[in-house]
Amino acid sequence: MRPSIGVLIVDDSAVVRKIVSEALTTEGDIVVAGVAPNGRIALERLELLRPDIVLLDLEMPEMDGLATLKVLRERFRDLPVVVFSTMTERGAAVTLDALAAGANDYVCKPSGAANLQASMRVVRGALLEKIRVLVARARDAREVRVSQSAPRPLPPPPPLPEPSNAPIAAVAIGISAGGPAALSAVVPQIPADIGVPIVLVQHMPATFTALLAQRLGAASRIRVLEATHRGRLEAGTLYVAPGDRHLTLGASGTSVLTLLDSGPLENGCRPAVDPLFRSAAQVYGTGLLAVVMTGMGTDGTLGATEVRRSGGHVWAQDQATSTIWGMAGSVVRAGLAERIFRLDDLAGDMARLVRKHRPAEALVGGRGRA
């Protein structure tokens, strides 16, 4: 049997502590190791309780979540932390601060639920998989640390065309859990003269994606915008998919446009990576670089298959630098990854690939200009 997962719940609301506790303890492998009404008490109890994961509210009296997280990271570097967030602009801002300070992931507090049972269902849906994946990764890291065994060979690629030597005309990125911190490390390092547009799907609600784009833009040499419907792609600009809208690309004359829609969820997500990759493969063909980064689940794998079928490039983040090696790991296991990169190498390697040939022009289907 798997060892049980001990959870420390830190929230100043007794109602929230009750909802989360009851939601989690319906699962046989999860136990509530303890609760705390604020960060000060939580830090006092950590040594005694030794939980496997901490669920941390951000807005609390006496010692708030952000201050608690900074101390916690100094004392317990590898302890997984999932922060509770509210669906407000302030909640989004503090959540991004927490992710930058070392939180592994976040969940939004249930709002508008009809009753206690409905709230518990929302909590279970948001938390269970995150808790299990993050704790499993932390346990594996403790057991293995730096494994001395030989790395496993990559699986043979499926029967797909080899990536083309055509100029890179665009970059499409898919990312989820651990994304804000990873993007904060990568995007500011992208050179201003990258020469191609970059389109990004980060699994996040609407208020969060707008703020993420603002923060990345303020710290970067390239322009960063939240994508708009029928906006024209321009080189040297990164376009972030708005929360709750799928982002796809479409050719229009000599331009490529960003298209937004509220179609059905894919892989449980909107925005999802697969629609972006599929449409970008159709527009750019051999001129596309698709990058799959840290995140839970398999979103991006089907889209990456279409990119490879079109002769484009697919890169995946390595396990060591991913918060959760779900999305990127799925692409690697499917044999789709032409290259597996470390987070610190991505910006430089991407720029080198773009510059490898002649200056990139926006290609449609690898056959002509967009």
Image (spheres, grey):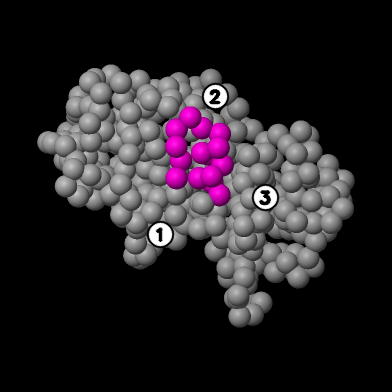
For badge 3, the amino acid type reads: Val
Going by the numbered disc 1, the residue's amino acid type is Arg
Q: Position of residue 26 (x, y in %)?
A: 64, 67
Residue 120, above or below 344: below
The quarter of the displayed image where residue 119 is located = bottom right
**Could you tell me residue 299's position as x and y percent?**
39, 50
Rendered view: 61 above or below 122 = above
Question: Is residue 177 or residue 165 the one in the foreground?
Answer: 165
Prevailing secondary structure class for the magenta stretch in the rendered image: helix
How far across and down, in percent of the image, does residue 203 sit?
A: 47, 51
Q: Earlier in the sequence, mark 3 or mark 1?
A: 3
Disc 3: which residue: 94
| Distance CA(mark 3)–CA(mark 2) | 36 Å
Q: Tag on residue 147?
A: 2
Q: Does 101 appear in magenta? A: no
CA distance separating discs 2 and 1: 41 Å
Q: Nearer the viewer, mark 2 or mark 1?
A: 1
Q: Residue at x 51, y 51 (%)?
A: 209
Amino acid found under the numbered disc labelled 2: Ser
Q: Quadrant of residue 310?
A: top left
- For the magenta stretch, what is the residue range? 211-225
Sequence-wise, the earlier of marks 2 and 1 is 2
**Foreground of the two, 29 or 299:** 299
